[in-house]
Image: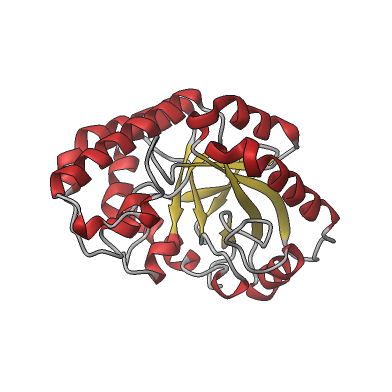
Amino acid sequence: MTHTFASDCHNHSDRSPDGKDTVPAMLARAKELGLYAYTLTDHCECNAYRQEYCARTRAAWMAMCITRPVEGVRFYRGLELGQPMQDLPGAEEAVARFHYDFIIGSLHNLRGEKDFYYMEAAAMPLEHLHTLLARYWDELLEMIDWGGFDSLGHLTYPLRYIQGEHGVFMDLERHAGKIQEVFSALVEKGIALEVNTSGLRQGLGETMPGLELLKRYYAQGGRLVTLGSDAHCTEDLGKGIDQGLELLKAAGFREFAVYEKRKPVLLPLE
């Protein structure tokens, strides 16, 4: 890593169903990369909390607790809370069960819909895709109004698949008003915005959100930002974090946050 305080605060171990490597292996890789701070955030998909993720989150917490610290890396215990409004009692239970340092709020699928990962976007009418995006912003606003998380994960997640995988360009100017509402709500609630760097190594070719949206967030008074690679294996851990830090500088930011005991610790973009 080229930045003194480079930190990766969104990634997954094999305690997530789509993760590959163990918690100790991920932490060892964080040390090898020279990360200043490493936060592991295994999945809790709230729309399947009772069926699957109540047990999974317990197993993930235990795996983090029994993993020995590694000298030189600040290791924080986190959670990625997916679709919290689709089982709010489950989400609130998941957040309260353990003493997490950091909780990401994410939206992978809309109510009654599949994860955007599974959608055949190229076969869908463009107007229907814009309707799905409109619903996406609205459900994000519900999540922010609830406010039970620390950072909003991978804003523009649908574009990872609609645009990056299926090649269907989505004009976000049609959604500028809703995006502005999302940014205003984040600022009002004191919730951070994540810069998710996974899009840099995927078909999307940019962070989620990208530079122009980061500039808009900053212009609306947004100052709290976190960074995560969204790695699901040791090979991807830390990828894009240095680029993400430079992107934040270009958008006007002077610092970013890692979270300890659910409180932001601000670090310079060095």
User: Is residue 263 visible from the viewing direction of this image?
Assistant: no
Depth check, front residue: 247 or 198? 198
Residue 135 point in image, percent of width and height: 29, 34
* Residue 33 % position (x, y): 63, 74
Above or below: residue 118 compared with residue 182: below
Closest to the observer, 174 or 267: 174
Residue located 76% across and 50% down the image: 59
Left of 22 or right of it: where is 33? left
Is 206 left, or right, of 85 in this rendering? Answer: left
Q: Name the residue located 19 percent from the left edge and 43 percent from the top edge.
A: 128
Residue 202 visible? The answer is yes
Residue at 52 percent across and 59 percent down: it is 230
Position of 53 compared to 110: left or right?
right
Q: Residue at x 33, y 63 (%)?
A: 206
- 24 left or right of 196? right
- Could you say where residue 162 lies in the image, as x and y percent from the top left? 27, 56
Residue 261: x, y in percent? 70, 38
Q: Which image quarter: residue 98?
A: top right
Q: Nearer the viewer, residue 104 or 16?
A: 16
Snapshot quadrant of residue 130: top left
